[in-house]
Image (cartoon, helix red, strand yellow):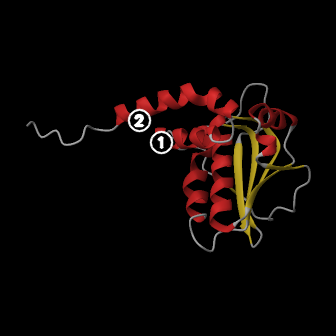
């Protein structure tokens, strides 16, 4: 989607080769746009022969919401646990570097100035996705909150609200009219 005054189209491009998984973010990355990454990438990281690394190019990213940032943290943790690999944020724009620094992630995530050559074939994730599930948004923020006390304070209220929403979305257990 293109915003007024923004000629950059919001998109996530993905590719893969023997070095790992590659993600190129452009424009404004919000929960609805990054939702497909959860299913595709996190499930890949569950397998014993998972990818050695994930590279995320943020050179053309003008904004990323906390759900996307939390998803990146969750991917990094899952990657370290499953294969000892890491998520590499490369060529982060000034806006993205500022956001990551404000949350204190510059010491947790690998943030690198240069990027490896990305695969020649990159596919765009679908732009018209269903609304992200509350569980997805909650999980991303829980991963983010585990990074620091500052993040816990910053996103604690949102976590409580999401937990309440999730509880209200689930039907009550066994209500057979007894």
| Residue toward you, 128 or 162 | 162
- Check if mark 1's residue and mark 2's residue have beta carbons within 8 Å: yes
Q: Earlier in the sequence, mark 1 or mark 2?
A: 1
Find residue 31 and report its horizontal and vertical position in percent.
Answer: 60, 38
Q: Which residue lies most toward the left here?
A: 178
Quarter holding the C terminus? top left
Q: Rate crowding at label 2 as few (under 14), some (14 to 19) or many (20 or more) other CA atoms within 10 Å.
A: some
Q: Rate crowding at label 1 as few (under 14), some (14 to 19) or many (20 or more) other CA atoms within 10 Å.
A: few
The residue located at (59%, 64%) in the rendering is 44
Would you say residue 21 is visible in this rendering?
Answer: no
Would you say residue 46 is visible in this rendering?
Answer: yes
Identify the secondary structure beneath mark 1.
helix
Quick check: 124 left or right of 172? Answer: right
Identify the secondary structure beneath mark 2.
helix
| Rendered view: 114 above or below 134 | below
Find residue 134 and report its horizontal and vertical position in percent.
Answer: 47, 38
| Rendered view: 61 above or below 56 | above
The residue located at (63%, 27%) in the rendering is 153
Alpha carbon distance from label 1 to label 2: 7 Å
Q: In which quarter of the view is residue 68 placed?
A: top right
Q: Which mark is residue 166?
A: 2
Q: Which residue lies most toward the right here?
A: 114
Quarter holding the N terminus? top right
């Amino acid at each position: 989607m293109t915003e007024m005054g923004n000629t950059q189209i919001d998109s996530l491009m993905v590719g893969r080769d023997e070095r790992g998984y590659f993600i190129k973010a452009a424009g404004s990355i919000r929960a609805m746009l990054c939702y497909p990454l959860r299913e595709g990438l996190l499930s890949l990281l569950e397998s014993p022969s998972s990818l050695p690394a994930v590279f995320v190019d943020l050179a053309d990213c003008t904004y990323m919401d906390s759900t996307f940032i939390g998803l990146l943290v969750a991917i990094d943790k899952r990657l370290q646990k499953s294969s000892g690999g890491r998520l590499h944020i490369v060529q982060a724009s000034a806006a993205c570097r500022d956001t990551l620094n404000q949350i204190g992630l510059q010491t947790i995530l690998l943030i690198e100035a240069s990027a490896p050559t990305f695969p020649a074939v990159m596919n765009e994730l679908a732009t018209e996705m269903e609304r992200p599930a509350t569980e997805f948004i909650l999980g991303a923020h829980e991963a983010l909150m585990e990074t620091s006390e500052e993040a816990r304070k910053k996103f604690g209220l949102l976590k409580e609200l999401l937990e309440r929403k999730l509880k209200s979305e689930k039907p009550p257990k066994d209500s057979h009219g007894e």
